[in-house]
Amino acid sequence: QVQLAESGGGLVQPGGPLRLSCEVSGFPFSSAAMSWHRQAPGKERELVATITSGGSSNYADSVKGRFTVSRDNAKNTVYLQMNSLKPEDTAVYYCKAQRWSVVSSRLVDYWGQGTQVTVSS
């Protein structure tokens, strides 16, 4: 059974750092493309950062230079290091795993439950 478990969210002051983790179980993590998304109240879910199975990363313009995505295949975990946090970064953050399903011959997405990040003084 595939499971994604996010952790590390919380309350942080503007300008502060926070690191999110997402531990994956139930399939070969190293073959999956991973991404972080967020959803603020009243807004649609948006893509924050992606990292391929090979380690290449991309970021939304709003977080470039402040957020860093990384992965540790030995620990089946993807991270999102967030620095210089702003109040507008407040949202529920979700990790997503995408992998090719041999059974269904298509890409399949798996989502975590989300972790709340609140940036406020």
Image (cartoon, rainbow, N blue to C red):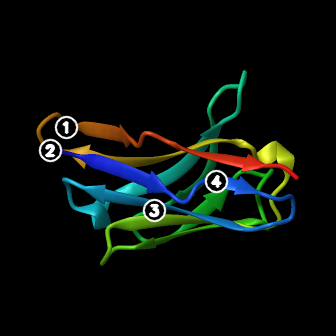
Q: Rounded to the nearest whole Å, what is the CA distance between mark 4 and mark 2?
A: 38 Å
Q: Which residue is mark 2?
A: 102
From the top left corner, tell me how far across and down residue 101 is, in percent: 20, 43
Q: Secondary structure at mark 4?
A: strand
The reply, left or right, for residue 92 in relation to residue 112 is right
The reply, left or right, for residue 46 in relation to residue 50 is right
**Which residue type carries mark 1?**
Ser
Residue at image location 34% in from the left, 74% down from the top: 73
Q: Which residue is mark 1?
A: 105
Q: Which class describes the residues within 10 Å of circle 3: few (<14), some (14-19), or many (20+)?
A: some
**Which residue type carries mark 2?**
Val
- Does 55 sit above or below residue 94? below
Q: Rounded to the nearest whole Å, what is the CA distance between mark 1 and mark 2?
A: 5 Å
Residue 52 disc label: 3
**Which residue type carries mark 3?**
Thr
Mark 4 and mark 2 lie on one chain; the one further toward the N terminus is 4
- Does 89 sit above or below residue 51? above
Disc count in the image? 4
Residue at image location 51% in from the left, 52% down from the top: 35
The quarter of the displayed image where residue 53 is located: bottom left
Q: Which residue is mark 4?
A: 10
Q: Rounded to the nearest whole Å, what is the CA distance between mark 3 and mark 2?
A: 19 Å
Residue at image location 41% in from the left, 43% down from the top: 112
